Image (cartoon, rainbow, N blue to C red):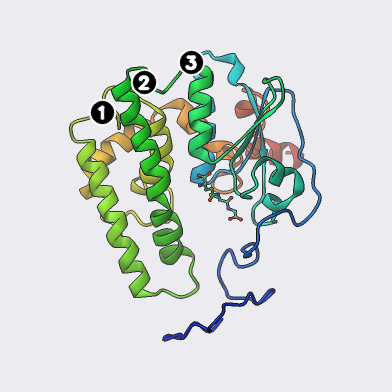
Amino acid sequence: MDTNLPYEPAKVWKWEMGTENGGKFAKINRPVAGATHDQELPVGKHPLQLYSLSTPNGVKVTIMLEELLALGIGEAEYDAWRISIDDGEQFGSGFVDINPNSKIPALMDHSTPTPTRVFESGSILLYLAEKHGAFLPSDPALRAECLSWLFWQMGATPYLGGGFGHFYTYAPVKIEYCIDRFTMEVKRQLDLLDRRLAGNQYMCGDEYTIADIAIWPWYGALILNKVYSAAEFLDAPSYKNLGRWADEIWQREAVQRGRMVNRANGPLEEQLRERHDADDFATKTQDKIEGAGSGS
Ligand SMILES: N[C@@H](CCC(=O)N[C@@H](CS)C(=O)NCC(=O)O)C(=O)O
């Protein structure tokens, strides 16, 4: 790819397969859907099988599952298998059977008469909330408010992730036009959330819901400088209500646990690469695994 501007698009775009453009995702991006290879997925002992990664979209689901378990809902026990998107595992045939869109997270519920597949993180949150009767208000007006914010997150966040995060953090060249365009929109979104949270403890009022669970891994983590290292650039401290909400949610044990699942970066004690049991948080974090392996 020629990174010099200006660039004149060809009449018809062509995929130059194997061309290195320097972008972080260059080797996994492709213009066609479908499986690239046969690869069965493992199935563990619990009814819920999650195939995911500790990106914000993945973390939404592991936080939800840990919150359900914290409520004492044992049917929410799950196995979480790590899908390495850098290695193209989202294009394996088994994964594509569960999510034809080839993106984590994907969930298989084996407790139904025939296994139920669920993909798209917002859809998974809604499925689990309805199945277990939790984190979704029953009052019709509050439920509508909750779903409005849930769907807002799903629609708004590509501007944060695919737009701002991509051009600020990952793009091989820093392009002022792109960074300005998406910073403008992301700051508008942050202001929107800040205003909403000025008079509300949570996104839908007094009740912690799937709207908070969907929004925190992106916007809470952004404000707390846990994604993109952009808190200073975005002037995070100026969003005081959002900061208060982000801190408060981060204090929840289920949130801290959920953020560890399928993680393979950051401090070793915060990485639980696969989760098959509640005890794994105490015994199978990467510091313990590597410590045991080193013979020390
Ligand atoms: N709208 C989807 C987005 C999921 C998504 O973008 N997943 C990314 C990781 S955060 C992924 O799997 N990327 C792999 C790829 O694009 O090939 C959701 O919320 O579930």
Dot 1 or dot 2: first in sequence order is 2
Q: Is mark 3 within 8 Å of ligand 1?
A: no
- Badge 1 element: loop
Q: Amino acid at mark 3?
A: Leu
Left or right: residue 259 compared with residue 207 = right
Dot 1 or dot 3: first in sequence order is 3
Q: Classify 121 as above or below 21.
A: above
Q: How many marks on residues?
A: 3
Residue drawn at (70%, 56%) of the image:
87
Q: Nearer the viewer, mark 3 or mark 2?
A: 2
Residue linked to disc 1: 201
Q: Amino acid at mark 1?
A: Gln
Q: Quadrant of the N terminus?
A: bottom right
> Which x, y percent locates residue 157?
40, 50
- Badge 2 element: loop
Determine the image quadrant of residue 81: top right
Q: Marks 1 and 3, how far apart in space?
A: 20 Å
> Which x, y percent locates residue 143?
35, 25
* Label 3 CA crowd tier, 10 Å (few <14, some 14–19, many 20+): few
Residue drawn at (22%, 29%) of the image:
200
Could you say which is closer to the camera, residue 134 or residue 66?
A: 134
Q: Is mark 1 within 8 Å of ligand 1?
A: no
Q: Amino acid at mark 2?
A: Pro
**Residue 280 appearing in the image:** yes
Q: Classify 133 as above or below 187.
A: above
Dot 3 or dot 2: first in sequence order is 3
Q: Nearer the viewer, mark 1 or mark 2?
A: 2
Left or right: residue 250 compared with residue 82 = left
> Which x, y percent locates residue 155?
40, 48
Residue linked to disc 3: 71
Determine the image quadrant of residue 228: bottom left
